[in-house]
Image (spheres, helix red, strand yellow):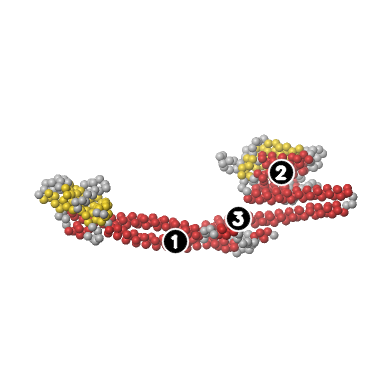
Amino acid sequence: MWQKFLRRQKPNKGELVSESTPSLRRRFIIGGIIIISVIAALAINFVFEYSQRLADISYDRLLRSALLQMDENIGLMHNEVTIDIPWSAFATLAQANDDRVFYKVVSSSQGFITGYRDLNITPPKPPQLDKIQFFDREYSGEMVRFAWLERHLTESESTGTVRIIIGQTRLSREELSSSVTERAVEVVVMIALVAVALIVLGSQLVLRPLHRISRVLEERQPGDLTPINIKTPKETYHLKMVINHFMARLQTNLEQLENYTADAAHQLRTPLASLRALAENARDKTSPERQQEALENIVTQCDSLSQTVTLLLNQAVVSHRMQTNPKEPVDLLVPVTASCREQAITALHKGVSLSLEADVERAMVFGDAFALQQMMQNLIENAVRYSNLGAEQATEVVVRVEEFSNYYRVSVIDYGAGIPEEEKKRVFERFYRGRYDTAGSGVGLAMVKDIIDHHTANITILDTQPKGTTFQIDIAKYQSSNDSGSLL
């Protein structure tokens, strides 16, 4: 019967929109490409900085060698500082064919000795004697790498210091740095492309179990809700178990719907047949009195049928709410009080005194207010209906709310004929009725049991003294997050 709800339908407009969103594989690939691009950019930046340092280290050695050769040829003649710049010093720097060389030798006592007179360059750090410093400065319209040295004269006839400055343009350095960077960038780009290719291939392999699960579900016949038995990796095992759990819940719900529909049809068939028989009987009556009596029976039967339909609809609403609506903190006194007010007039018409006794001002529980009110309404209605059976005078129904350390207790007490011991275990069965001489559908207490189970509560049927029945419900207190954050 319910299999027709599982037939495949054409995707609607909303589904088409959802299918146009990026796939998981595409997101995985795009995310991988972004990460690899960032890593590659950082690697290229590191290589660029390293290649510049490498070029400076290499050519600074040549610059240092030339500076030391010039320093070795500084002497003193007739108390004057002289320098004979060796050919080998410039030959060393000549290995950089396109670069230009600038130099200057200055004495603290004589001043300028040789070189470029306008080469007035000072190092960025405070000068230190006998220590070579390397730094970059712009000179003659070009960026130049300088080596700077100042030391004491070692001849005994003279005192003071001599300063040697030698510089070389950065053309060869930049060329070496670019060469190293280009090679490194080629390697990084190649590695990045290989990594992207591996991500594309890996994404296909990683998502293959999901495709297998999807293919298994698509190939199934409508109504097949058996568990998925294919082997999956550990990462998709939880997904498979969740799908199996969901299908098991759906199977249970569909079976409940099928049984509920079948039982409801069976229970409605009898009052409808009775209603038809009463109507035919009223049609055949010739006496106005008998017709009036038959019409009153029809009205009574219609009221009973209406009550049964109302209970069935309420049970469907409660069942749907318990499956879809999350629980929330509820003051139990609110649904209890509302149910007593709704049943007060009915109890008054039947000569039953309905009272509420509560020793607490507030009773917070974790649940669904509508479902709890339906539960109390059915219990109170059931107690009012059966409370005056076999009673010689008007009786009463007492609804009592009590507080204990970890739970609240709600008792619905009547003083009617009571329930035989052998029937107490069956009163919560759907459509079961212990007595057929009173109006009823056998649905109310079954709904009460479903609500009790949903709220993880306990219900007990006790005998009222001297006679009658007490339905006793124990439901756990709600503990706010400020205290412990959970149910007691």
Secondary structure of residue under mark 3: helix
Q: CA distance from mark 3 to mark 2?
A: 34 Å
Vertical order, 317 against 478 (above or below): below
Hey, what amino acid is under mark 2? Gln
Residue farthest toward the front in the current orientation of the protein: 141
Q: Which residue is mark 2?
A: 377
Q: Which residue is mark 3?
A: 245
Position in image of residue 59 (x %, y %): 26, 57
Q: Residues within 10 Å of mark 2 (few under 14, many from 20)?
A: many
Secondary structure of residue under mark 1: helix
Residue farthest toward the left in the current orientation of the protein: 78
Residue farthest toward the bottom in the current orientation of the protein: 219
Inspect this view and state whether residue 244 appears: yes
In the picture, the quarter occupied by the C terminus is top right
What's the residue at 81%, 38% (across, down)? 393
Hey, what amino acid is under mark 1? Val
Image-quadrant location for residue 192: bottom left
Q: How many marks?
A: 3
Q: Earlier in the sequence, mark 2 or mark 1?
A: 1
Q: CA distance from mark 3 to mark 1?
A: 37 Å
What's the residue at 64%, 56% (across, down)? 250
Between marks 3 and 1 in the image, the one whose residue lies nearer the viewer: 1
Vertical order, 375 against 215 (above or below): above
Q: Residues within 10 Å of mark 3 (few under 14, many from 20)?
A: few
Position in image of residue 408 (x %, y %): 65, 40
Q: Residues within 10 Å of mark 1 (few under 14, many from 20)?
A: some
Secondary structure of residue under mark 2: helix
Q: Nearer the viewer, residue 303 or 212?
A: 303
What's the residue at 16%, 57% (across, down)? 86
